[in-house]
Image (cartoon, helix red, strand yellow):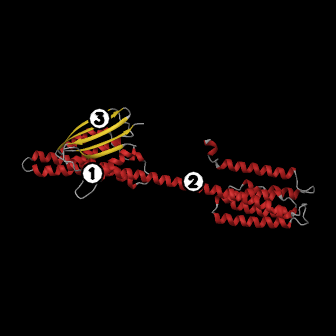
Amino acid sequence: MNLLARRPPPWLLILADTVVAVLLALASTVSPPEPAANAATTALCWLLVLPVAVRRLWPEPAYYGALLIGLAVLALQTNRLMPTVVTALAIYPVATGLPVRRSAIALVSGLLVSGGSLLVSMPGPPQYPNGWPDPVFVIGTAWLAVGASWSLGTAARTRREFAAREARRQAEQAAAHERLRIARELHDVVAHSMSMITVKAGVAAKVLDKHPEEGRKALRAIEEIGRGSLAEMRHFLGALRAPGSAPDSTPLPRLADLPSLAHRAAEAGVQVDLSVDGTVPDSMAPAVYRIVQEAITNVVKHAAPARCQASVSVAEGRLRISVVDDGPGQRVLPGRPDGHGLAGMRERALLHGGTFEAGPRPGRGFGVHASWEIP
């Protein structure tokens, strides 16, 4: 079925047109239109089918050439069928390859030329008992054949243009989705690193005079976090600047990076008890990492010093994420009804068809829970 739906290569179409042209030429030679057909009319019929063979290479010249040669054929003999067949075949690539206006001009020109030449070549009284004039019938049939071929070609061109527009739309939509994903990743990197840097800078400012070694340790942590974040941001920004970049051109976080995340949070005053049970599919690992990262970042920003329990488990075909702490329950900045962090975590969970819950725990603390089925 795929082979039938696929468009044949151009050389095969040209070969098919050549075969059709040869068959038409042989038909005009074997069954001449008149008993008195001479060599000149036979050669003219062979010349008439030449535009059929080259109609895909030079659509307009082949079409108008077919009209002119058809005039000569009708002037020398009464072969009314061959010029009509060749004209109908020649107008198809004109309709498929040219804009509607130019192909419509070609259609009107062909109808006028073929109709006038047929009318001039058929003098005489009506030949049908019902009184329908023979010229009207022949001209109407010729116009119907040429018009039908033009309509089929126009429909084919419209379908191809629609398919091309749809392909461009899907490509642009895929690029937009990828850029949105990169923007989310960039937000997570910036939010997490800046939170850690702010906390460590505050620690350094407080202890630098009395405990210089602790202050230098905090400054080294700031330097380490800043270097790592800058490296990630360069990757993300490079992908955003380069349209059409591959989705895997940006680094994806791994679950193996969670311990270092917990270590950085501990340096910022949040003790994280991390547990990972089961095997998380690679396709879901970035979303799991970002949800845990954003939840811990919120604890660092709004609840430190605090203790936090972060768990990732896979059991009975379902992946569960839980991050709970014992700090204050508020997790958004004052004066703002919601934060981007919670919205981003919810989006990542819903992207996999899962559920997401976040809110204050009874008594004290805050909890983030997400889960979805593993196919």
Whether residue 270 sits left or right of residue 207 in the image: it is right
Q: Is residue 263 visible?
A: yes
Determine the CA span between mark 3 and mark 1: 24 Å
Determine the CA span between mark 1 and mark 2: 42 Å
Mark 2 belongs to which amino acid? Ala
The residue that appears at 24% across and 48% down in the rendered structure is 298
Whether residue 160 sits left or right of residue 188 in the image: it is right
Please state the horizontal and vertical placement of residue 31, each as a whole percent of the image: 87, 51
Q: Which mark is residue 191?
A: 1
Q: Is residue 338 above or below residue 319?
A: below
Q: Which mark is residue 163?
A: 2
- Of tags 3 and 2, which is closer to the observer? 3
Mark 1 belongs to which amino acid? Ala
The N terminus: image quadrant:
top right
Whether residue 88 sits left or right of residue 246 in the image: it is right
Determine the CA span between mark 3 and mark 2: 47 Å
Please state the horizontal and vertical placement of residue 159, each as a whole percent of the image: 61, 55
Q: Is residue 163 above or below residue 139?
A: above
Mark 3 belongs to which amino acid? Val
Which residue in the protein does label 3 denote?
276
Q: Is residue 233 visible?
A: no
Please state the horizontal and vertical placement of residue 366, each as a whole percent of the image: 23, 45
